[in-house]
Image (spheres, coloured by chain):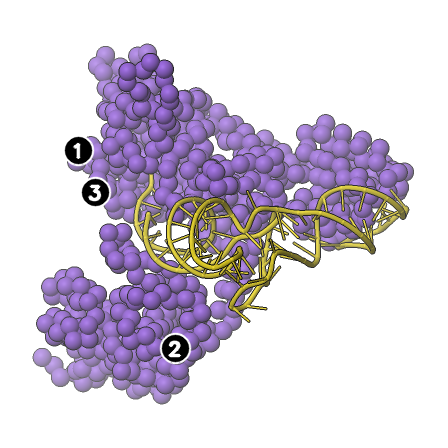
Chain colours: A purple, B yellow
Amino acid sequence: MSEHVTITLPDGATRDYPRGVTGADVAADISPSLAKAALACRVDGVFSDLSRPIEADTQLAIVTGKDDAEALELIRHDCAHIMARAVQEIWPDAKVTIGPVIEHGFYYDFDRAEPFTEEDFAAIEKRMREIIAKRDPVRTEVWSREEALHFYGNTNEPYKIELIEAIPEGEPIRMYWHGHWQDLCRGPHLQHTGQVPADAFKLMSVAGAYWRGDSRNQMLQRIYGVAFKNKNDLKAYLTMLEEAAKRDHRKLGREMELFHLQEEAPGMVFWHPNGWQLYRVLEDYMRRQQRAGGYVEVKTPQVVDRTLWEESGHWEKYREHMYITEIDEEHANEKRVNALKPMNCPCHVQIYNRGLKSYRDLPLRMAEFGSCHRYEPSGSMHGLMRVRNFNQDDAHIFCTEDQIEGETARFIDLLGAVYKDLGFESFDIKFSTRPEVRAGSDEVWDKAEAALEAAIRKVTNNFELDPGEGAFYGPKLDFKLTDAIGREWQCGTFQADFVLPERLDAEYVAADGSKRRPVMLHRTILGSFERFSGILIENYAGRFPLWLSPRQAVVATIVSDADAYADAVVEKLHAAGLRAETDKRNEKINYKVREHSTAHVPAILAVGRQEVEAGTVSVRRLGEQGQKVVPLDEAVAALAEEATPPDLR
RNA sequence: GCCGGUCUAGCUCAGCUGGUAGAGCGCCUGAUUUGUAAUCAGGAUGUCGGGGGUUCGAGUCCCUCGACCGGCACCA
């Protein structure tokens, strides 16, 4: 074996070094300033420590602060280690577990009898800054399994022992030191602790988390932190959080009098007039879209005997999450057990099964704005986003296997158009395959997965694979959209189901006269009206486009002499189909403008003596300074045009 | 469901080591007729989340139940 290795740099230049040369050596050889700026490297594309010896000819790239993604990854990862070191220095009884990089930052899970509090953060952060100031070198060694197990036996770190035992045979066990503090880690890491910016991280919260993500395991304490390349990025992130908090749909829901939730009905929405207006606009819109998309609409019962849920398989799998109704039937020998429907699918099959269906009836697209109840775990509820009673824009497409492809494309078209109309330009697709616990044979799953994958590939190859995350009866596509401040929301879903038609004995007569099973495609676009309303509220921060806005215009009087005119203006607005109201209170116009602006009313039409005289209105639009005086008819026409739903323009 | 936290007027919040509740906004009443983000004055806010306990005395301490918040787990 040669005593030298040839290093090829990104610009194509090659250099020869003795075997065992490190990335740090190469950086230093290129220039002292690069040596200083170097954070890590890529060896043949593999992200690696600068201190790792290079044993063969390689492509080498030095990673510096200019490489955004890599630099952040390193900063955050080292931050997690530095935090763990700080915690163990302050509380030596805390056991370490894992501390990965996450979006915007990092966390580290500890096992410690005493709870951490946010009051502890200042002390931890202070110690972290001290560790950073020390510029302690980061060192790494590959150890044998026995050696590492022995080490963690001595240091009494049981979780590290578990982690080592889970590392597959043959994979290196990499030990890291940040100064004197040691951790088991895949790496890579920075050259020394001083490369973490001391003013660009912040500890955010402490929360419980199960060891290895399994609820049967011990609960650990997780400390979350965020970290960036510099102070400004941190500041910008914290500002973004403040902005997000301002548009929280729970806060806006109260302020705009959209809805409320209360203790007597956890997870069930009391829609107020404004919120219900928004809901109905959305529902009307979806109804039009579905009608245009070739769907028929149905309505099925809320309370259904358990036998149907047993047939469908839901009783067995989801019984604890179903609301069971109890009725005091007089003289009943045996009480019937009913459940509030947790989903609509079995009910739709009942409609399908009435009468014999022909292949000529397929595809049959059956839609329902179905109200479903699911007893969601108490800790999972969140405003409108996760509720126990929700209304889906649900539909089931009964079709032949040959029709799956066409229906998939057709659905994605509709979904894209709807999202666009509702203010979301793009969406991501996730393809989820068979889960461990599932119904149906492997042959059926093979067929379902293949059919769905072929269908999606006809439309786009731009999707993410999510193995094991499918529904229990079939593989699915999930559709995620990104809101105005970059957050992702899962809304639509499209699921291929070969199982339920079998279980509930759905069939059709084929062209050759034989009876066949249809495929059922389960699908929603919005997901639920509750959740989607929440997303809309947050995406628009309460400043809805006119067509969606619950309140569209307020006609505010400046003097009481204009009262009669204000009524006439509102009448014209109503006649044009707009949602309008008067504000004739004995208050200054400044007061009214402020109040309706904070209430996110999109248009304030002020009327005083001049407007009465001239037959005009003074229009002030939400978010704009100042106002425009325009003839009444012109103002009404412009608003009516703007308030037309996008599908009717 | 699990870990931690919170719950005081419609809303946002103050109430120290236990001594029987307060502010601002909103609301009500009156005055003010006002030109584009808060007119002035007066008034009423309440089982301090529910229940139990300790105490002469509990918003405050303890127990318990509930809801909510931040996560985790779950999400047909």
**Callout 1–callout 2 Cβ contact below 8 Å:** no
Assign a secondary structure to mark 3. loop
Disc number placed over residue A441 in the picture, else none: 1
Residue A502 makes an appearance in the image: yes
**Residue at image x 51%, y 64%?**
A238
Callout 3: chain: A
Q: Quadrant of residue A584?
A: top right
Which of these two is toward me, A375 or A234?
A375
Quadrant in the picture for the N terminus of chain A: bottom left
| Residue A108 against residue A428 in the figure, above or below | below
> Separation of disc 1 and disc 2 at Cα?
54 Å
- Tell which circle, 1 or 3, labels the residue nearer the N-terminal end: 3
Mark toward the viewer: 1 or 3: 3
With A546 as the anchor, is A562 left or right in this view? right
**x and y, in percent, of residue A273 in the image:** 61, 34
Categorize mark 3 by other alpha carbons within 10 Å: few (<14), some (14-19), many (20+): few
Assign a secondary structure to mark 1. loop
Assign a secondary structure to mark 2. helix
**Residue at image x 30%, y 36%?**
A320
Q: Quadrant of residue A318?
A: top left
Q: Which residue is mark 3?
A: A436
Query: In the image, what residue type sits under mark 1?
Result: Ser
**Residue at image x 39%, y 63%?**
A206
> Separation of disc 1 and disc 3 at Cα?
12 Å
**Residue at image x 68%, y 34%?**
A579
**x and y, in percent, of residue A362 in the image:** 34, 20
Disc number placed over residue A128 in the picture, else none: 2
